[in-house]
Image: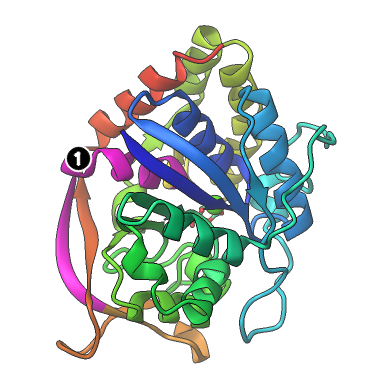
């Protein structure tokens, strides 16, 4: 059983990842922290609270940074996730509210309280994580490991030809994280582009889990339509679920250990690049995946939900 916190910008595939974590018997979810990216940070907080309430989980949600460390704020990715983050599903206010601590302070405190046990899985831009690293020099040492959805080594980008969206939206923060010496697993486009879910797969999820799976099925329609607009007709990538699955099932991924740096300017801004050997700690970069096994796990666990 792993103790997990997800840092998230929900977001359609974020919702899939959070519901997967809620269903997985080998994951104890301790809370969520929120970040801009797919939506603004206040909308991410609202959506995170709503997902937890839907899943029947009373867990803390800590709101994070409203913009990148150094760059000016980006417009949310509404063409991918819809204005409100969940495709065509209308906005709905949750009953609960976020905790008074901000995301970075919450993460620092939780890492101290669960020293050596906490797995942190950021599935949005890395601003909150960089802030926690800057505020507490012990932060990464207190974590068991960090599993990031982001980056791309050989695959090229998805928001620019060079950059994956989560890293692109705050490259300075990402560089702080890759330099911090954490036990780091990078689940990037090299593997998430291999894990595809079709309309028929979501129909099966909705049939087996009418309430929560049905909500994911509705959201997926918007997401799949976006993929079709960019010429991808064989399904959408399970980006964020893949990272959460890698937290408890690293054996499904093949990695190469490399020091990673992030380009912070020019046309390659947001690219994750191999750094000079010895210049910083090594990241385990996922380069191959048992894609069918990841997808099977995703579908089997979502089927456990109401
Ligand atoms: C990442 O960007 C966001 O759109 C998704 O939620 C995922 O975290 C994929 O590049
Ligand atoms: Ca995300």
- Under 8 Å from ligand 1: the CB of mark 1? no
* Number of marks in picture: 1
50 or 141, which is in the foreground?
A: 141
Classify mark 1: residues with Cα within 10 Å, few (<14), some (14-19) or many (20+).
Answer: some
- The region drawn magenta spans 240-259
Instruction: From this view, report whether residue 21 is shown above or below residue 32.
Output: above
Q: Residue at x 50, y 48 (%)?
A: 6
Q: Is residue 300 left or right of residue 205?
A: left
Q: Is residue 241 magenta?
A: yes
Image coordinates for residue 294, horizontal then vertical, percent: 29, 33
Q: Is residue 109 magenta?
A: no
Question: Looking at the rendering, in which quadrant would you find the N terminus?
Answer: top left
When asked about the image quadrant of residue 28, the answer is: top left
Image coordinates for residue 194, horizontal then vertical, percent: 31, 44
Quick one: SS at disc 1? helix
Q: Residue at x 58, y 47 (%)?
A: 32
Instruction: From this view, report whether residue 190 is shown above or below residue 13.
Output: below
Q: Is residue 234 visible?
A: no
Please identify the dominant SS of the magenta region: helix
Q: Residue at x 77, y 51 (%)?
A: 43
103 or 193, which is in the foreground?
A: 103
Q: Which residue is tagged 1?
A: 252
Looking at the image, the residue that sits furthest to the front is: 113
When asked about the image quadrant of residue 147, the answer is: bottom left
154 or 231, which is in the foreground?
A: 154
């Amino acid at each position: 059983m792993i103790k997990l916190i997800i840092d998230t910008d929900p977001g359609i595939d974020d919702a899939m990842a959070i519901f997967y974590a809620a269903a997985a018997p080998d994951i104890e979810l301790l809370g969520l922290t929120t970040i801009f990216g797919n939506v603004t940070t206040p909308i991410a907080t609202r959506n995170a609270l709503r997902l937890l309430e839907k899943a029947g989980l009373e867990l803390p949600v800590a709101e994070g940074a409203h913009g990148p460390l150094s760059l000016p704020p980006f417009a949310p990715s509404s063409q991918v996730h819809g204005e409100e983050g969940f495709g065509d599903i209308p906005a709905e206010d949750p009953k609960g509210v976020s905790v008074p601590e901000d995301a970075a302070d919450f993460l620092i405190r939780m890492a101290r309280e669960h020293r050596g046990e906490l797995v942190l899985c950021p599935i949005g831009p890395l601003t909150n994580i960089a802030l926690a690293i800057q505020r507490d020099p012990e932060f990464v040492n207190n974590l068991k490991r960090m599993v990031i959805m982001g980056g791309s080594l050989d695959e090229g980008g998805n928001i620019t030809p060079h950059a994956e969206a989560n890293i692109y939206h705050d490259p300075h923060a990402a560089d702080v994280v890759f330099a911090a010496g954490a036990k780091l697993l990078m689940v990037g486009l090299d593997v998430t582009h291999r894990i595809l879910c079709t309309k028929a797969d979501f129909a099966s999820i909705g049939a087996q889990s009418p309430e929560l799976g049905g909500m994911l099925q509705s959201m997926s329609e918007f997401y799949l339509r976006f993929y079709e607009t960019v010429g991808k007709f064989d399904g959408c990538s399970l980006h964020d679920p893949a990272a959460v699955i890698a937290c408890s099932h690293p054996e499904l991924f093949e990695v190469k250990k490399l020091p990673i740096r992030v380009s912070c300017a020019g046309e390659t801004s947001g690219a994750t690049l191999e750094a000079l050997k010895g210049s910083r700690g090594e990241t385990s970069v996922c380069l191959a995946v048992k894609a069918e096994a990841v997808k099977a796990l995703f579908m089997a666990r979502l089927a456990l939900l109401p």
